[in-house]
Image: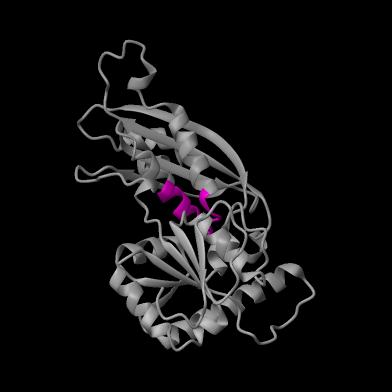
Amino acid sequence: MSSEITWAFAHPSERAEATAGPEVLDRISLRDHVVTVEIGAFQAERGTMQRICFNVVVEVAPQGQLDDDVDRILSYDKVTEAIAHELAAERLNLLETLAQRVADRILMEPQALRVFVRIEKLDRGPGALGVEIVRARKSADIPRGDDDRPHPEVIYLSNAAIASGHLKGWIDQLEAGHRPTILCVGAAQVPAPQAAHPLAQRRIDLLAIEQNAWVLAARDPRCVVVNSRTELDWSMRQGQISVWAPSKIVLDAVDGPSAQPRDALELVLWFARHMQAADVLVIGESLPDVADLPVRAMAADQPVL
């Protein structure tokens, strides 16, 4: 028991050694790598930067004769790049999620067989609060990179388009086309509550858009309201037509939109870029002046997409 307690608080390299199997593996490690980020599930952690510390150990198969060739080894840079990539992808609430994503990205490297990831918050109390995970590659694992994500058609529906008698016909066409599709809306044409604090108002305005997303979903059961990138990716792969609820992605974005929620179409264009959309269709509003996206517009009384 005393050994197990010692391992629990030891550096991941010692835990890796203590839990090693009969196969001899090499290890590379990253110790006390401190990064300042915004992370956390509590409201007090929103808009606040805090230090988190990474300790990572990666077990790799011995590479034999290296000939002093850097291309034959797993570079330490791959570990720090995995951390930087996941921190830049979106704002996260949980250290557990971050640890899982860092481990998954490291295991995409062909040399990596098992990885230990320990992450600690340094500023949330008198001590370090953290989580440690261990993940191993399975023989059947096929690493999936970001390039495998679908590139959807993003469709912005004005309030006139949501109320249009052609809505069902449009959904029929989208369903028959089998393209990854995400529908987006703005707020309904009703006054939203007003708050003196800009961050509070931003949340109110985002929620107003989500209310209208549910109005659209109620008009056709094939429209499913979705709020996370993970579920959007899954929905597109399943051929599901999603309706974007923006709060989570907007608030969790590391490099968030400059557009305010009241500028719904500008917010949707930011989302299309974020999702690396193949194209954008605007129904019921004037075509915006956009140079970096393939965008087209149509009237809300037009039956064919």
Residue 54 image offset from top left, x and y in percent: 51, 40
Q: Nearer the viewer, residue 34 or 288?
A: 288
- The prevailing secondary structure element of the residues shown in magenta is helix
Residue at 46% from the left image edge and 43% from the top image edge = 118
Comparing 74 with 268, the one in front is 268
* Count of residue discs: 0
**Is 91 one of the magenta-colored residues?**
yes
* Residue drawn at (39%, 78%) of the image: 170
Residue drawn at the location 20% of the way across and 31% of the way down = 22
In the picture, measured across the screen, residue 91 lies left or right of residue 275, that is: right
Q: Is residue 211 above or below residue 267?
A: below
* Vertical placement of residue 89 versus 42, above or below: above
Q: Does 26 appear above or below 115?
A: above
Which residue of the protein is positioned furthest toward the right in this rendering? Answer: 196
Q: In front here: 204 or 113?
A: 204
Q: Is residue 259 found inside the magenta-colored segment of the image? A: no
The stretch of residues the image draws in magenta is 89-101
Identify the residue at the far top of this view.
67
Q: Is residue 52 above or below residue 273?
A: above
The residue under the point 61% across, 70% down is: 264
Tell me where residue 28 appears, x and y as whole percent: 40, 28
Residue 174 position by quadrant: bottom left
Locate the C terminus by quadrant: bottom left
Q: Position of residue 122 (x, y in %)?
A: 61, 46
